[in-house]
Amino acid sequence: MNKIFKSISLLAAAAVVLPSLARAESKSIYGDDNRLDYFEAAPAMRTLADSVVSLWPSKQVTPEAGAFSLRTIGFGEALNLCPGEKFREQPIGAFCSGTLVGEDIIMTAGHCITDDASCADARFVFGFNIDNGGGKARTSVQAKDVYTCKRIIKRDLDRQAAGLVNTGIVIIGALLGKQPGPDYALIQLDRKVEGRKPLPINRNKDLKAGDRIFVIGHPVGLPLKVAGDAGVRTTEPKSFFLTDLDTFGGNSGSAVFNASTNKIEGILVRGGTDFVDSPAGCKVQLKSGQNDGKGEAVTKISMLQKYIPELGSSKSASLEIRDMQVEQAPAADDALARRIQF
């Protein structure tokens, strides 16, 4: 999952604009590609997935006959993927992922929501998935599954830390006292979410190297995917841990779960290069051995847990102070050219 922001215009296939894909040692697929569609996942995973949300630019989510229509483009078409690449025929459109952690609170990455303006423009959509074998992605959703931003409860983003991770000098930076910082945002929605439950977080700070984990989100803006069979590589940096999860841009903001407890351990925020050019002139998804590459970075839930009300608590998120460490939002592109965050 490359941290660089790659723009995908959804005006038409001919208008797709992708910057050069930087070479990197870190890979997005470690060992076997473990990503599963919603309908392929175990029942317990689907229950968790029901509380995962996709983030969309407002102009791609339009009212239509009492519901909302999601404007998308073909994955393979947008990125010029080679034939046979996994999920090539599916649509993309979401720019980030998030998770319901309170009745009206979404947890995502800090680089997904940059300021009040970007929050106001975002639409938080539940149910963008494929729920049966041979079925198509759900690109029309009920009004009860679409939400807007009321306010930013808390946000943090250490851009210097992001640079350390991308250049592969995380541990060196830590030894020099340059501890990478967190990357997260907590968003209060315009109303309580209907029919979906907030998911529990691990407040014990007991995660350790070797623990088994999984992630649920929207890689490259695809319909929801569950990816497991992964582990924690190291928990040494203060604010994040490294994993071998199979993640991509668009997974930014995805909750990472402990496979033993199903509790949230952190937020997927950074990683390596997603795609490279093949000799055939089309792009392929980059793969490596399970233990190769620098790994995918996950902000520890301990960095923000004090801002997340405990489930069943009457404590109000409205009492929290908003973090003003924000960066200027990118200039608005055309109606359908909102950036997918990588």
Image: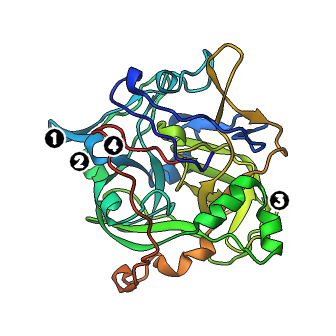
Residues at discs 2 and 1 in contact (Cβ within 8 Å): yes
Q: Residues within 10 Å of mark 4 (few under 14, many from 20)?
A: few
Q: Is the C-beta separation of discs 2 and 4 under 8 Å? A: no
Mark 4 = which residue? 333
Q: How is the image coloured?
A: rainbow
* Helix, strand or loop under label 3: loop
Q: Amino acid at mark 1?
A: Gly
Q: Is residue 207 left or right of residue 72?
A: right
Nearer to us in this view, 174 or 49: 174
**How dense is the environment of label 1, judged by Cα within 10 Å: few (below 14), some, or many (20 and up)?**
few
N-term-proximal mark, 2 vs 4: 2
Q: Badge 3 is on which residue? A: 210
What amino acid does circle 3 point to?
Gly
Residue lying at 62% horizontally and 77% vertically, measured from the top left: 203
Q: CA distance from mark 4 to mark 1?
A: 28 Å
- Residue 322, given in percent of the width and then of the height, sits at 40, 79
46 on left or right of 231: left
